[in-house]
Image: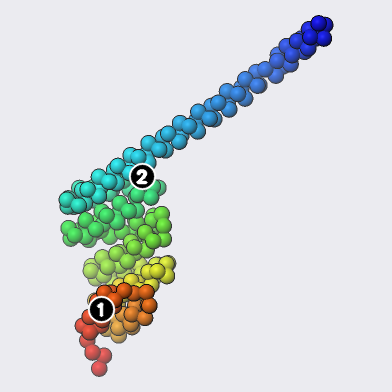
Amino acid sequence: MDSEEEQLEELKRWWKEHGRTVVAGVVLGLGSVVGWTSWRAHQDAQAEQISLRYEKLLNTAAIPNRRGTVEQADAIIAEHPDSAYAALAALIGAHAAYNGKDMTTAQRLLEWAASHGDSFEVSDVARVRLARVLSEQGQHDAALAALDRITLPEFSAVRSETRGDVLAAKPDAAGARAAYESALADGSLPEIARERIRRKLDALPSSG
């Protein structure tokens, strides 16, 4: 009995000295769990929200409502710039602006997508489209510079073809011919693309 009472007294002394620390640790631990759970719930809600907004953007673009598409794309970029949807929204908004002959907005959105794409594929798609938009505005050197920033080997054929288009518009027939021939040398190029490039080659002025 004495031993039990001594143990009880020892426990009381230990609790008096360390009890508050233990409670604080438990509270902090529970707070961390609750905080993590709340953060995850917030993240899931955010992901669902932007997914729905992106779906709405796709529906608006399909109508097509060009002005609404650009406005919604800009909203996604402004509110969720770090999400994977932002650069995709920029591509969609740029396409709508281009179809509406608003080259300034198309260029702005494509430049954003090229710089902020969450993957090299998205960024390189933006660079190809940006080069075409710049070339149509007579900014041929800037278009070529955009193509030079393409990184993925999978884009080599489309980069060469687009380079040919830019040089043909410059005009630089010899450079365009070399670029088109480089594109045709890519063994992965589908036949429909080869035929398109051959037609472009045939349309070039004779070097003689």
- Label 2 CA crowd tier, 10 Å (few <14, some 14–19, many 20+): some
- Label 1 CA crowd tier, 10 Å (few <14, some 14–19, many 20+): few
Q: At label 1, which amino acid type do we have?
A: Glu
Q: Is residue 16 above or below residue 58?
A: above
- Asked which quadrant contains residue 135, the reply is bottom left
Q: At label 2, which amino acid type do we have?
A: His
Q: Is residue 139 above or below residue 44?
A: below
Q: Which residue sits at x=19%, y=60%?
A: 99
Query: For numbered disc 1, what is the local secondary structure?
Result: helix
Residue 180, disc: none
Asked if residue 75 can be seen in this view, the reply is: no
Q: In the image, residue 26 lies at what x, y percent? A: 60, 23
Dot placed on the residue nearer the N-terminal end, 2 or 1: 2
Q: Is residue 98 above or below residue 192?
A: above
Q: CA distance from mark 2 to mark 1?
A: 41 Å
Residue 80, disc: 2
User: Which residue extends farthest bottom?
Assistant: 208
- Asked which quadrant contains residue 199, the reply is bottom left
Q: Is residue 203 left or right of residue 84?
A: left
Quadrant location, the C terminus:
bottom left
> Dot 1 corresponds to which residue?
195
